Structures are given as structure tokens and as C-alpha cells.
Amino acid sequence: MGRGVHISTEFAFLLSGVFIMLVAWALNLLGTIAGDQSSGHGVSDVYLWLFLMFQGLGFSTVGVIGANYREFMTNPALGKRYAVGFLLIADGGLHLLALNQHLGAAPQAAFFAIVSPIQIVGGIAFIDLPRRLDPIWLLFTGFLIAAFVLTRTVAVWPIGVVEEVDPLGLISKAVEIAMIAMLVSLVRADNAKKSDLRSASPANGP
């Protein structure tokens, strides 16, 4: 018999938490489509749905920390990589809610429909992704912040209007700023490690 698929405890916690988050988003989506006012743009409603969605992320966090706390204590860089992964998932969840809020606007809805899965899948896989991709995630996150500022400043095609500054967007940008700080730290640490390796290698002869 062939070997079965092995899923680690931390990965099971992570997937379970993401599943909880997606279920909360789907309920919000159904309420939005049905015209339920409690699924709208109100600040209190946004916080309610954020709480429901991030319960899942909190569940994942507890599981991952419980499975790796010894490694986190001895290897801070590992903890930072997990933190970036969770921030990516969190921002993807925020963009899923933004998708629900922009169902009537095709350009915005399409943007969030593309960005959200990239962030959530990237967050799940981030710990195992090659470190050479860290600068790409850094640029991607910087692009999201720049796009937010631009669309709140001028009317950009194909949106055609200046978007309002909303609580959900501000929370998302706060998450992205934290993510950039983590990614910059990881990129610098990786560059320093490469520099040390080059310095330690024997000089090439003539």
C-alpha cells in the first residue's frame, strides 16, 4: 500500500482557521447579495464581520504557536516568516470583505477577487516559499498601499471616481504596513547572511 498524505498539526490548524474565515466571508457574501443591511458598510457591521472572520485566524495562530514555540524562541526569523504568512492571510480576508462591499462595481470587485486568493494562498504557503521571493511580496504589498493612496486621491481608470476612505481600507493598510516592516527585516537578514557567506568563502585565485 502507498503512503497516505501526511498533514502536520500546525498545517491542520492553519487550514481549519482559514476555513472558518472563509465560511464567515461566505455568510457575509450571502447577506450582501440578499440585501441584508447587517452585511453592509456600517462601521459596527465591519467590526462584527472582522471579529467573526479573524476568530479563524486566531484559532490558526494558537495552533501554530503551540506546535512551534520552541523553534520560535531559538529562531526569531522563523517567527517572522510565520507572521508574514498570517498577515497575508489577514489582508486577504480584509480584501474578501471589500469584494463583498464592491459587488456592484466591476473594476473594484475584479481587483479584490484577484488579490484576495493570491494573498490567502501565498500566506498559507509563505513559510515554505523560497526566500528569493520575499522582495516580490514586498513590492506587491507596496503596490497595494500605493493603489489605495492613488484611488483615494484621484479618479483612476477604470474606476472613474475618487474612492472614499473607509475603516476596512485603513485596517487593511495597517496590516500591510506591518507586513512591509516584517518583509524588510527578512530581506535584510537574508542579504546579510549572503554577504557573510561571500566573506567567509575563500578568495578566487588568479
Image (cartoon, grey):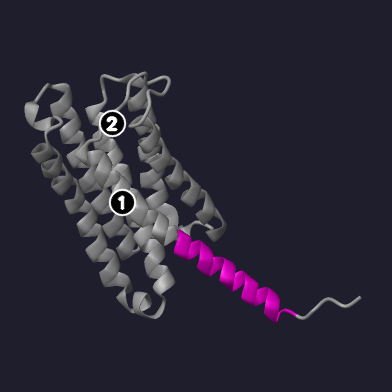
Classify 10 Å Cα crowding around label 2: few (below 14), some (14-19), many (20 and above).
many
Q: Mark 1: which amino acid?
A: Val
Residue 2's label in the rendered image is: none
In percent of the image, x 57 and y 57: which residue is there?
Answer: 132
Furthest-front residue in view? 153
Relative height, residue 193 to residue 57 (above, below)? below
Q: Which of the two marks, 2 or 1, is nearer to us in this view? A: 1
Secondary structure under tag 2 reads helix
Q: How many marks?
A: 2
What residue type is disc 2 on? Answer: Leu
The circle on residue 175 is 1
Residues under labels 2 and 1: Cα distance? Answer: 17 Å
Q: Name which residue lies at 42% across and 48% down.
A: 122
Residue 38 sits in quarter: top left
Magenta segment includes 93:
no
Q: Which residues are magenta?
A: 184-201
Q: Is residue 118 above or below residue 202?
A: above
Q: Is residue 112 left or right of residue 23?
A: right
In the rendered image, residue 12, in percent from the top left (x then y), is placed at: 29, 58
Any magenta on residue 199?
Answer: yes
**Image quarter of the N terminus:** bottom left
Give the image quarter of residue 110: top left
**Residue found 33% across the figure and 59% down from its top:** 11
Foreground residue among 120 and 46: 46
Quadrant in the picture for the C terminus: bottom right
Which secondary structure class fits the magenta region best?
helix
Which residue occupies the foreground of this view, 145 or 82?
145
Say whether disc 2 or disc 1 marks the residue closer to the N-terminus. 2
Q: Is residue 7 visible?
A: no
Residue 99, numbered circle: 2
Q: Position of residue 128 (x, y in %)?
A: 47, 59
Residue 5, position as x, y percentages in the image: 40, 57
